[in-house]
Structure formats: structure tokens, C-alpha cells
Image: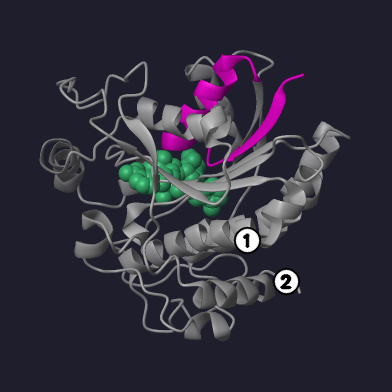
Amino acid sequence: LRKLVVITGASSGLGLSCAETLAKTGKYFVVMACRDVEKGKRVAKERGLPDGSYTVMKLELASLQSVRDFVANLKAFKSARPLTHLICNAAVYKPTDPEPVWTDDGFEMSMGVNHFGHFLLVNLLLDDMSRAKGARVCIVGSITGNTNTVGGGLVYPQANLGNLAGFEKGATKPVAMADGKPFFGAKAYKDSKVCNMMTVSELHRRYHEDTGIVFSSMYPGCIAETALFREKRQWFRKLFPVFMKYVTGGYVGEKEAGERLAQVIDDPQCNKSGVYWSWNGGAQTVGRWAPDGKPRGAGGSGGEIFENQQSDAVRDIETAKKMWALSKKAVGLT
Ligand code: NDP
């Protein structure tokens, strides 16, 4: 029987590439959890995901009700079969917005989608997944949340949850930022990624031993072409991949990034909980730059996987505990 994997944000970028990789192994049935179901269906066909290897289901992470509806629909769809794998991948990045945009529940959009929506989703699925053998949950992280790296530490602004004053106030309109300070889009994304990575550590600490579920986070490398950067200006979108490729060496093509995420789900080597996975070495797409600017794909992993160290901010257990408790409250779990 194929394993059942849910991938959020599977209609684009990393999520789509991972969905394609896993579906084509023949070992997984992929539930593509997308805010735009028609788009999900169209891109799955375009990428040639084999018929019978996937389905597309509605999930709007900017609405807690939609998260609850998704969980109910998933349950009906899979009947008694437990969910074996969950990949929380969807994200928005709003670096240029001067004002915050709000989710249905009044959260600032990037924190609401990237963190709160996924936080509720994981919590609602834990029980079911604990019945599965070899269950794994991966929440996609980022070095942007890691103050001990160039991408995360030196590039302004830095992630900083402060003392979570914003979460304490409920994290809803007009409170835009986790630390309660005025809205700053680029920082809100980074803060949400820190919350993602802290959530993994907390899930591991709280549930790994009892449930056997393997919880992990990963940084895929910089996939500079994805739609994540859609709000950046045109010159940035042209130059950023080149910069990442030739200057920082952190560039990875979409196909290979998808393979990396799939590796965290499938590789027996990644059966360790509480790990933040990263890859060493040059991605294979380096040097395969094409005139149209589209990566050509790698067909194999170029980098070597390793257990990366979380930043001090992510490893701050007291803040993580507080973040967990306040997030539960914010999404209505207590
Ligand atoms: P994309 O923008 O290509 O993909 C993001 C996905 O999230 C899309 O499928 C999008 O749907 C979906 N999404 C956005 N908002 C919502 C919502 N409200 N509800 C449900 N789904 C939503 O970006 P990437 O593939 O680059 O990003 C994927 C992950 O990788 C993110 O977690 C990001 O933080 C992480 N990451 C990316 C890096 C990079 O260099 N690109 C580096 C490090 C981490 P739709 O298709 O409808 O737009």
C-alpha cells in the first residue's frame, strides 16, 4: 500500500517539485493541499504526475476554518487509513507591502499563513498520524530565520520574536508583529520561519517519544526563481539567482530542491527526529544556467545532506514554550 503524504502549497515551486518527485517514485499517494484547486490540477497535469498518484484538495491557510475543513475532508477521503507524512511547505513573503494584510482570523498574512495555519494543521493531524508506522512531519524552514548564517544573520532585518508581546495580545489586528512592534513585512516572514522551526523542536520534545512521529525541519537552499519572490522588483528577480549562484553558492534549482525535501520524507537516513536538515556542496544546477533563466534541473542530488545547527534564537526553549502556548490560544486549541 502506498504511503499517504499531504503537501501544503503543492501548486508551485518547492512544494510542486517535491509532489512530482514523490508521486513518481510510485511509493506515495500525494494529497496536494492548495488554496487554488484548479491551479493545482493544472500544474499536476503539466508536470506529468501519474494518474492515480495524487489528488488536489482545498486548503486556504489564511483561514482557520479552511484548515479545519481540510482536515475533515482528508479524513473522509482516506477513511480509516492513517496519514503517514505531512509536509508544511506553503508560505507567503511580503517584503514590499507598506501595510499589513490580514487573514480571515485577523492575523498578519505571513505569520498567519506560514505559522498559525500550519500550527493548527499539524496539531489537528497528530492523533491520526500517531497511528501510522514510520510517520514523518517536515516543516520547511529557512536560513532567514537563522541568525548564525549569512543569509539569516547579516541580511537586514533579523528575525526577532522579542518577548512575544504581539502574540500575548492575541496576534490579531491591529497587532501585526510577534514582538508587538510596527509592521515590517520582510521581518514578519523571518519571524514566521523562526516560529516554524521552533514548532518542530517543540513537537519533537512533546510528542516524538510517545507517538514515534519523526519531526524535522529543512532548508532547501536558495531557490531564487520561485514565486516566493513575486513581490520583488523585476531587476531583483533577474539578478538574485545569479548572485546566489556565483557569489554565495547557496543557489539550488527547483527540481533539486524538491528532491531534497522528498529525501527528508523518504530517506531512511532521515528517520531521526528533531533535526534541521541542510545540504553541503554545490548544487548540480550550477553551471547549467540557461539563457531563458530557467534552471534545467539536476536529476540527482548535488549536495550532501547534514544535520545543521539551529540558531540561538530557535534554540531558546523558554521563548519556544511561550510561542507554543500563545499559538495554541491564538488558533483556538485551548
Ligand atoms: P512559492 O511561492 O513558489 O510557493 C508557495 C506555495 O504556497 C504556493 O503553492 C502558494 O500557492 C502556497 N500558498 C501561499 N499562500 C497560501 C495560502 N494562503 N494558503 C495555502 N497555500 C498558500 O514559494 P517557494 O516554493 O519558494 O516556497 C516554498 C517553501 O520554501 C516556503 O516555506 C519558503 O519559506 C521556503 N523557502 C524558500 C526558499 C527560496 O529560496 N525560494 C528558501 C528557503 C525556504 P499558489 O500556487 O496558489 O500561489
* Residue 294 falls left or right of residue 325: left
Check whether the beta carbons of the residues at disc 2 and disc 1 lie within 8 A of each other: no
Asked if residue 119 lies in the magenta stretch, the reply is: no
**10 Å crowding of disc 1: few (<14), some (14-19), many (20+):** some
Question: Is residue 23 covered in magenta?
Answer: yes
Tell me what residue is drawn at x 29 percent, y 33 percent: 252
Decide: is 312 above or below 167: above
Q: Can residue 54 be seen in this view?
A: no
158 shown above or below 228: below
Q: What residue range appears in magenta?
A: 1-27
Marks 2 and 1 sit apart, C-alpha to C-alpha, by 22 Å
Q: Where is residue 179 in the image (x, y as percent from the top left)?
A: 43, 81
Mark 2 vs 1, N-terminal side: 1
- Assign the C terminus to one quadrant of the image: bottom right
Q: What residue type is labelled 1?
A: Arg
Residue indicated by mark 2: 332
For residue 205, which numbered disc appears in the image?
1
Query: In this image, 236 relative to 146: left or right?
Result: left
Is residue 321 toward the left or the right of residue 210 in the image? left
- Does residue 221 sit above or below 100 in this rendering? above
x, y percentage for residue 76?
Answer: 85, 38
Give, as a three-letter code, the residue at label 2: Gly
Residue that appears at 32% across and 57% down:
144
